[in-house]
Image (tube, helix red, strand yellow):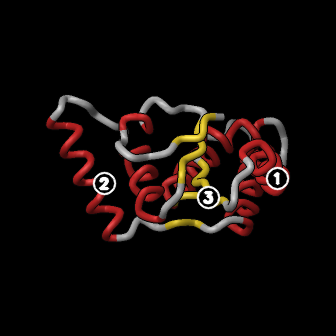
């Protein structure tokens, strides 16, 4: 099953100084995936990291990593069906007293809608999403 990469998988690779192509190669090798993508939410999260860089060099490295990533893998959108699914899941979980971080909820809903698993180093919120397959890093 193809994987949507959560930022928690990508950020450590970027911090090690890897370019996005090398990071994708390493992730694919480790996961044995049959395809990779990222959610538009991950693009937002990585852009947030660029804005928070504490040096110009780090900002440039992060910007290059994101540009390479966007060029290398499909970016899956938040479509109306994804939004409806996320809203339904959020309402059901909230009714049960459980809150899922919006970013993770949207990534999870995107994965379910497009038929992907989620690769993450932080499964805490993703494991609360019914039917979602998680690949832990």
Find out whether the residues at labels 3 and 1 contact each other: C-beta distance under 8 Å: no
Please indicate whether residue 101 sits to the left or right of residue 53 in the image: left
Q: Nearer the viewer, residue 52 or 134?
A: 134
Q: Which mark is residue 2?
A: 3
Query: Along the polypeptide, which appears first: circle 2 or circle 3?
Result: 3
Query: Along the polypeptide, which appears first: circle 2 or circle 1?
Result: 1
Q: Which mark is residue 86?
A: 2
98 is higher (above) or lower (below) than 1 = above
Q: Residues within 10 Å of mark 1 (few under 14, many from 20)?
A: few
Residue at the image point whose x is 42% and y is 57% from the top: 112
Find out whether the residues at labels 2 and 1 contact each other: C-beta distance under 8 Å: no
- Assign a secondary structure to mark 2: helix
Q: Tell me the quadrant of the picture where the N terminus can be found.
A: bottom right
Q: Nearer the viewer, residue 5 or 29?
A: 29
Residue at the image point whose x is 77% and y is 53% from the top: 24
Residue 133 visible to an observer of this rendering:
yes
Q: Indicate the position of residue 50 as horizontal and vertical percent values.
A: 64, 48
Q: Indicate the position of residue 93 as horizontal and vertical percent values.
A: 23, 38
Q: Tell me the quadrant of the picture where the C terminus can be found.
A: top right
């Amino acid at each position: 099953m193809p994987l949507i990469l959560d930022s928690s998988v990508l950020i450590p690779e970027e911090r090690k100084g890897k370019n996005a192509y090398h990071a994708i190669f390493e992730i694919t090798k480790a996961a044995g995936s049959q395809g990779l993508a990222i959610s538009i939410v991950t693009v937002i999260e990585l852009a947030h990291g660029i804005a928070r860089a504490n040096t110009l060099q780090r900002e440039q490295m992060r910007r290059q990593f994101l540009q390479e990533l966007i060029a290398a893998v499909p970016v899956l959108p938040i479509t109306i069906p994804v939004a409806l699914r996320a809203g339904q899941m959020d309402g059901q979980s909230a009714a049960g007293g459980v809150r899922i971080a919006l970013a993770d909820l949207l990534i999870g809903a995107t994965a379910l809608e497009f038929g992907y698993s989620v690769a993450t180093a932080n499964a805490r919120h993703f494991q609360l999403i019914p039917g979602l397959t998680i690949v832990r890093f």
